[in-house]
Amino acid sequence: MARWRCMSKRDAEAGGAVDVLLISTYDTDGAGKFTHLLARTLQELGHSTRVVCVRKRSADAATYGVIDHSPFGKIVYRLREEIDRRLFRPRPEYAFIHMRGLADRTVLAANVWPARCRLIICTFLSGMMSPAALLALRSRYGSPRVVFYGVDMNFYTAGCHYARECAGYRNDCSACPAVPAFARGLVRRTFLQRQACYRMLGDHVVVASSHEHHQQIRSSTLFGGADVRRILMSVDHLLFGGFEASRGELRDRYGLSGSRVVLLRSSSEPRKGCDLFVEAVRWFAENDPAALDKLAIVAIGDQYVAECLKDCEVRLLSPGYIADEAELARLYAAADVFVNTSLADGGPVMLAQALMSGTPVITTDVGLARDLVAPPSNGRILALPAAADLVMAMVEFCGLDEDSLRAMRVQAREMAVERLGKEGYMKELGGLVEELIGER
């Protein structure tokens, strides 16, 4: 392992040296949790890390926010986000595009950066750092290797997070349908700036976190000819799957005994596709109420699904957002099937967590579906994101006998441990990092 020279007083005040610097716009929600998972894994592998984001919201001691010590900066950033959201108004099937990030001088002058690092891993940059600032930061550290490791589309478009049906990134995003015509020049300019940046980086590595992500990266003009690897996420196999022995007690505890229990994420965000599930339940209510009587629905997240079905005779538990992962793992154990209705999604993480918990899935053909689901062993992948297809899959699932369901639970767990287990994840990630920082 390389040795550092003695640090000066200025180096120490700036935070010393780390092996890996992780840059993420957010340090909470999906992007932030993913970044912290990377950081924890790298630390277990023996590497020192630092996470730098726009504004620190997590309690992680090794995470720093660029605008944490600037009340004015926080206000300006928040206002800019709101203005962009209202002014550009992306179409519902597109996630928000950050049209502007922090000023380069704000980013580079912030006292949050380590004195030195040996590798830079970017997990989310939209709304945080311009390509010019990234190049300047890398130069400050002597031009270490850079890894773009994300779970959505923000690296290989002009900034859009999810736009599954769009192929504009195969050109230059100049005809982006998610923004008004007056903003398309800005979108194209952002795309070209990223393209120039990536070319100047030269030997960067891109990590795809799913089959779908890998295909999209390969199709992007931005990453044409890039070194693209694929590493699936890891899920805690001790926590998720650790309540199987208590399954019966948990079903009693939640009042779910005697029913086929369907678990899903409730979200009013259009790309999460919850209207698809609502439509399927209404079909049962109108055409097969006896089957609906045998179902119990657990909708985690917001109250969107509960509100949509409040006039429907259905057994529904809507506990809201579950911050406690142990409680979330218990709900997976109590469920018979997890239904993912996302129309565009890099994961979702819940799909991986459900399978690790031994809970079979019914899912749209997005994100990790083809990486993790092997029909009919551990679930079903819908041919189309249509209510009719979801109804057929639910009817088929509800018709399974207990022995078949138990067999699916075993296969779901075994396949998840094989593909998402910590040991394999650490081996792949560790091998990549050691290769890039020259430890082997």
Image (spheres, rainbow, N blue to C red):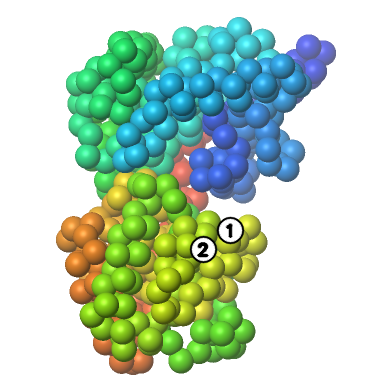
**Relative vertical location of residue 332 with respect to residue 53 in this rendering, above or below:** below
**Relative vertical location of residue 362 with respect to residue 104 in this rendering, above or below:** below
Crowd around label 1: few <14 · some 14–19 · many ≥20 (10 Å): some
Quarter where residue 1 is shown: top right
**Relative vertical location of residue 142 with respect to residue 173 in this rendering, above or below:** above
At x 68%, y 38%, the residue is 57
- Residue 300: give its label: 2
**Relative vertical location of residue 127 with respect to residue 343 in this rendering, above or below:** above
Q: Measured from the top left, where is residue 175 in percent x and y?
A: 22, 20
Say left or right for 271 vs 112: left
At x 53%, y 25%, the residue is 81
Residue under label 1, please give it. 321
Q: Is residue 182 visible?
A: yes
Furthest-right residue in view?
A: 9
Amino acid type at image mark 2: Ile
Rounded to the nearest angstrom, the CA distance separating label 2 from label 1 is 6 Å
Q: Measured from the top left, where is residue 126 in percent x and y?
A: 46, 26
Answer whether labels 2 and 1 touch (C-beta < 8 Å): yes
Amino acid type at image mark 1: Tyr
Regarding mark 2 in the picture, which secondary structure is present there? Answer: strand
At x 48%, y 31%, the residue is 124
Q: Measured from the top left, where is residue 326 in percent x and y?
A: 62, 67
